[in-house]
Amino acid sequence: MSDSVLIRGGTIVDRDHAARRADVLVRDGLVVEVAEAIALPPGALLLDAQGCVVAPGLVDIQVHFREPGREESETIETGSRAAALGGCTAVVCMPNTDPPLDDATVVQSVLARGRAVGLVDLHPSGCITKGRSGEQLAPLGELYDLGVRVFTDDGDCVADASVMRRALEYSTALPGAVIAQHAEDPSMVRGGHMHEGEWSARLGIPGRPAAAEVTIVARDIELARITGGRYHVLHLSTAGAAELVRAAKAAGLRVTAECTPQHVTLTDAACEHYDATFKMNPPLRSAADRDGVFAALIDGTIDAIATDHAPHAPETKAVPFEEAPPGMLGVETSFAVAHTRLVVPGHLTMQQLLARMSWNPAGIAGLDGEHGRPIEPGTPANLVVLDPDATWTRSHDTSASKSRNDPWHGVELRGRVRHTMLRGFPTVIDGEAQR
């Protein structure tokens, strides 16, 4: 493939400029020219962007690609392909693999596999504690030296306050490091399978209360205050936790948060047919919580949209609700869902949505040297071309993922990824993966 690519006819939307119609010329992995009209260089690849938005690539800072250990559900290759089709140029993989990412050798193997696949920049997170047991700190400094910047026991909460305090204190010696928490008090959610409320009572399914999240977030914010550490709330799902983050930011604390597309669009009512596709942790919440998270995303209290892409082999979800593992697909559909539910109705502008899906998450995860950058000469050509008017119906049968636990199956969406480019290489052209 040519070292030069011309993206023609799009409207550029990025962090530092007003939306502008311009062509973009890419050569040797960098943006080299942005102008109203650029002649096609000899031998260059032409990508049509008429009627589309040209933007910095999306950055998903919470995905589960299951490798190593559960490759029957997803692999780094299939997950990376889904992410590229979803417009991502970078992802942060969660460490709840088997073995977990608490060891330099395992992290190095994941990094190497991500580079070999080459469809997205794959950045492993590292465990906060050894074995994600919540007891003894993992070798944070050793993992940091490999490039790890996000530390989390995601899938499990660090319930011991003294352990969480030590992690936050330690992280202050690691520039750019962030301690990210799956905020559910395990003593309050043990045995629960959906949000505790009206629907859990109706369905006879044990619940996971919103208070389990709120209490951990409140505790951790106080720990962030006394340590000066950077604290990030993974997949925030409750109105109460959103209020705590809002207050922490007003107080000048180093606190950020993300939410998922499902937590700002769906509620626990989606579980009414006992369909385990809609089982996740933290669970889909009440309408009041959904509305509180939605408002916090709109006003900027919540910094980022991340998918918590959690594939599971089909047979593991085809069981009674209480026996199924939690998790949903999302990395391939996140832009389309967010655009449909947030931009089309006028709640966010395209630039505001891209802030939450590109440059904000890149900054949280320490990836903003390469990703989420303004589109101007000299910056890395990690780009996405988005068609905001494309209307399509999602089918899990065409998913790049190995799994099918897709909450958006059969849903009509507006907005679609047309092209994705990683360091000047088109990973997706006209909606088709190139590897």
Image: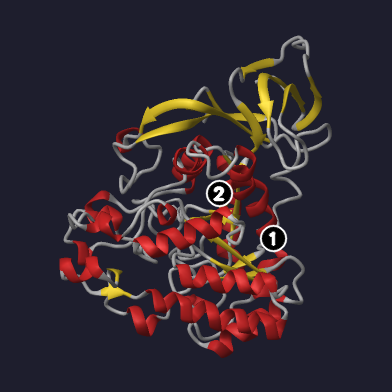
> Residue at the bottom extreme?
162
Mark 2, residues whose alpha carbon is within 10 Å: few (<14), some, or many (≥20)? some
Q: Which residue is mark 2?
A: 113
Q: Earlier in the sequence, mark 2 or mark 1?
A: 2
Q: Which residue is mark 1?
A: 147
Q: Which structural element holds mark 2?
A: helix
Quadrant in the picture for residue 202: bottom left
Residue at figure coordinates x 53%, y 77% from the top left: 217
Is 11 left or right of 275, judged from the image as shown? right
Mark 2 to mark 1: distance in Å? 15 Å
**Spot occupied by residue 285 in the image (x, y as percentages of width and height):** 36, 64
**Spot occupied by residue 406 in the image (x, y as percentages of width and height):** 33, 46
Q: Which mark is residue 255?
A: none
**Spot occupied by residue 152 in the image (x, y as percentages of width and height):** 55, 70
* Amino acid of disc 2: Arg
Residue at figure coordinates x 20%, y 70% from the top left: 205
Is 392 left or right of 77, judged from the image as shown? left
Quadrant in which the N terminus is drawn? top right
Is 278 left or right of 427, judged from the image as shown? left
* Amino acid of disc 1: Gly
Mark 1, residues whose alpha carbon is within 10 Å: few (<14), some, or many (≥20)? some
Quadrant in the picture for residue 327: bottom left
Classify 399 as above or below 197: above
Residue at figure coordinates x 65%, y 22% from the top left: 10
Classify 182 as above or below 258: below
Is 201 left or right of 161, judged from the image as shown? left
**Foreground: 261 or 190?**
261
The answer to the question of whether label 2 and label 1 lie on touching residues, with beta carbons closer than 8 A, is no
